[in-house]
Amino acid sequence: MLDAMLVRPEPSRSRRRAFGRWLVGLLLALALVGSVNGPALAQRTPVEGFADLVNRVAPAGVNISTKKAVQGRSGEESFPMPQVPPGSPFEEFFKEFFDRDRGREQQQPRRSLSLGSGFVIDAQGYVVTNNHVIADADEITVTTSDDKEYPAKLIGRDQKTDLALLKIQGDRPFPYVEWADSDKVRVGDWMLAIGNPFGLGSSVTAGIISARGRDIRAGPYDDFIQVDAAINRGNSGGPSFTLEGRVFGVNTAIFSPSGGNVGIGFAIPANLARPVIDSLKNTGRVARGWLGVRIQSVTDELAESLGLKETAGALVASVTPGGPAAKSDIQAGDVILEFDGKKIDRMRNLPRIVAETSIGREVDVLIWRKGQRKHARVVLGELPDDEQLAELGQPSTPQPGPAMTTAKVAELGVAVSAITPELKTQHNLADTAKGVVIVELEPNGPAAQENLRVGDLIVEVAQEPVTSPPELLAKVRQAKQDGKKAALLLVDRQGDLRFVALRFKE
């Protein structure tokens, strides 16, 4: 009985054939999966090292040295003459010594040297580097990977992105590298950096991409890629490569308390650098799109006061008179949510997107105004330089407000007054000043906690202009009655406009 239970009937020949076909199919499927995933993984993981990649791209990397004449300082500036009693025998000795030393310094100006990195982007010898590497240089020398030195000509520079373009001349085409699409590199991807750390000569380091979209407050268009490959002083201007051998970033800065590598380096994305370099190559300058607004971040408090469902966008604090926005329907107090179809998640994204947009192009701008979405059409102008911006006109003189009065706004912890000639003089207010003046702050009150000061002007409440203290008080109390938790104010501090959301006192 037990033996009968353990006996298995032999499968039929047809069943054995079917099982055989199934097994062969399974093995083929597994082999196919291995053939698809295996090579792809090998391409992304440099298990055999970076030697082949380095041999291919290193010839395009260059070292950059600069010289700058520095006038010698006078004897008193470099080392003060000792004070000796009048008539002392040392008086003539020290006078003769310092006079002779001054003469040597004035006749022999010293030379200041700096070292950096760069890379060749075409066979004609155009070289990309950082602006701070060659800033104020009298002489620029480029040393290629074969130790040949070439005098370099500065084609153009851009301080806002810290990029510069040089040109060297040779008797044969130069090895060069091409740009990558930096939008396609991912956090965690392998990368390679080449540079000239501490002036030692061409050096190679490897690592991964650590983060994207870093703002290190280096300029108005910060959008750095963070890498963990070793980058030190002298690496500035050098390239960061993908494993395909294309440049995805220009190494520019490090974060280091000691000045040496701690695994946090920053590279300008290729997609930001490339149009700047192309413009420098073609015209020697960079022309950028200009909207003509001053913006600020949207905080949680501001978003709540404005009725926004999410903390996003760029809040327009003021509109430049005569600028592109002033000629369209964009107003102070608008929140720009999208520009040319691109969502503005953070305020600092807008300047970069506007700058990259073609001058003279009409674009659609999605704005949030008083609880509603609206579309505005604006034709971009060219970003003027600082002097041109300063020369732009100011708003016309506002109409005078009502009679001079004062009011204490306990909800905000302030006392305000109408603008008077005495207050204009006391707080150095412009003749065109409008609104009401803060004349008293309650310690630790809502206004004081938001760093408002005596002398600041409150121009608007809830995006409505105020011309007198009673009007301000009425609008604040109305907002509180409407269930608002904060009052949205437009504050003017010596011509600097910004929106502030002040939470009402409990």
Image: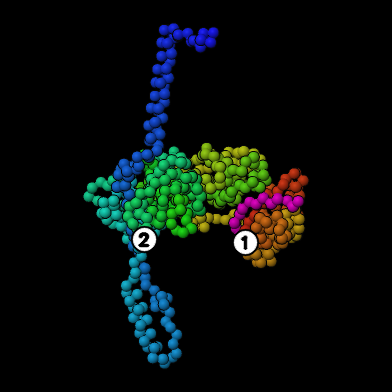
Q: Quadrant of the N terminus?
A: top right
- Provide the residue designation for mark 2: 114
423 left or right, relative to 74: right
The residue positioned 43% from the left and 13% from the top of the image is 19
Cα separation, mark 1 vs mark 2, equals: 46 Å
Whichever of callouts 1 and 2 sits on the residue coming sooner in the sequence is: 2
490 left or right, relative to 220: right
Judged by its main secondary structure, the magenta piece is: strand
Q: Secondary structure at mark 2?
A: strand
Q: Are marks 1 and 2 in contact (CB under 8 Å)?
A: no
Q: Which mark is residue 430?
A: 1
Q: Is residue 498 magenta?
A: yes
- Other residues around mark 2 within 10 Å, as few (<14) / some (14–19) / many (≥20): some
Q: Amino acid at mark 1?
A: Ala
Image quadrant assignment for residue 303: top right
Most foreground residue, 235 or 482: 235
Q: Indicate whether 181 appears above or below 72.
A: above
The residue positioned 32% from the left and 55% from the top of the image is 201
Q: Indicate whether 18 appears above or below 70.
A: above
Position of residue 23 measured from the top left corner of the image (x, y, whole percent): 42, 17
Counting every numbered tag in the picture gives 2
Image quadrant assignment for residue 24: top left
Position of residue 347 measured from the top left corner of the image (x, y, whole percent): 56, 47
Q: Indicate whether 19 appears above or below 223.
A: above
- Other residues around mark 1 within 10 Å, as few (<14) / some (14–19) / many (≥20): few
The residue positioned 57% from the left and 49% from the top of the image is 295
Q: Is residue 385 magenta?
A: no
Q: Secondary structure at mark 1?
A: loop
Position of residue 317 measured from the top left corner of the image (x, y, whole percent): 60, 50
Most foreground residue, 293 or 431: 293
Q: Which residues are magenta?
A: 494-506
